[in-house]
Amino acid sequence: MDIQPLGSNKFLVSLSPEDLRELDITYDTMDYSNIETRRVIWTILDYVRRNTGRDIDPSGNLLIEASPDGAGGCILLFTVPVSRTGIGTVISKTDSVQIFEFRSSDDLLDAMSAVGKGSIDGRIFTDGRKFRAELPSEKATVYRHIIEEFGIFIGNDSLTVTSTHEHWKELSKSTS
């Protein structure tokens, strides 16, 4: 289990296939309404507390974004919302791609530069004014905190992806 703090209210936990076996869970069976998933989340949060000193209350406001890592493992992005909106704990599973929108080509290029060459492996679209990047979820989840400094997350649902493909002009497809 690898823990990466991403700020005062976010951290990333990478679970290897071995970690998932030890925790007796798979990405496909993660569902916070299931008691076994809650047990796993509590176990992970206890591990995070013991190894980083961060004490996160799983019964408070907590957003958990889960994404497969492409190697049989899983990436979990934990965010403790700054505002107390009363959302409780939510696990959001990402689909295979995520869409980000940028106001200008400069913002898009700055985001790509900030995450490093080869880190953004996806497709670029434009509507003539704005730009969209369609990124594989496993990379988008890891770099999301950096990407959102330059653009905004639009969605990962099939409607957003299909709309982007149909109504935006594809500029390039990365082959990194």
Image (tube, rainbow, N blue to C red):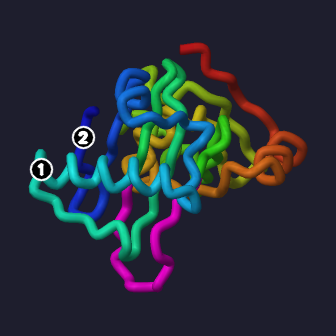
Which quadrant holds the N terminus?
top left
Q: Secondary structure at mark 2?
A: strand
Q: Horizontal placement of 28 versus 113: left or right?
A: right
User: Which residue is at 48% across, 38% downward?
Assistant: 109
Residue occupying the far top of the picture:
175
- The mark closer to the camera, 2 or 1, is 1
Between 26 and 158, the one lying in front of the other is 26
Q: Horizontal placement of 8 versus 37: left or right?
A: left
Taking the image as drawn, is residue 133 in sight?
A: no
Q: Name the residue beneath numbered marker 1.
A: 50
Q: Name the residue beneath numbered marker 2.
A: 3
User: Which residue is at 33% across, 45% downward?
Assistant: 12
Range shown magenta: 78-92
Q: Amino acid at mark 1?
A: Arg
In the rendered image, residue 117, in percent from the top left (x then y), is placed at 40, 23
SS assignment for the magenta stretch, majority: loop
In the rendered image, residue 30, in percent from the top left (x then y), is placed at 55, 46
Q: Amino acid at mark 2?
A: Ile
Mark 2 / mark 1, whichever is N-terminal: 2
Q: Would you identify the image quadrant in which residue 29 lies?
A: top right
Q: Secondary structure at mark 1?
A: helix
Q: Residues within 10 Å of mark 1 (few under 14, many from 20)?
A: few
Q: Horizontal placement of 160 versus 43: left or right?
A: right
Residue 79 in magenta?
Answer: yes
User: Which residue is at 22% across, 53% downward?
Assistant: 46
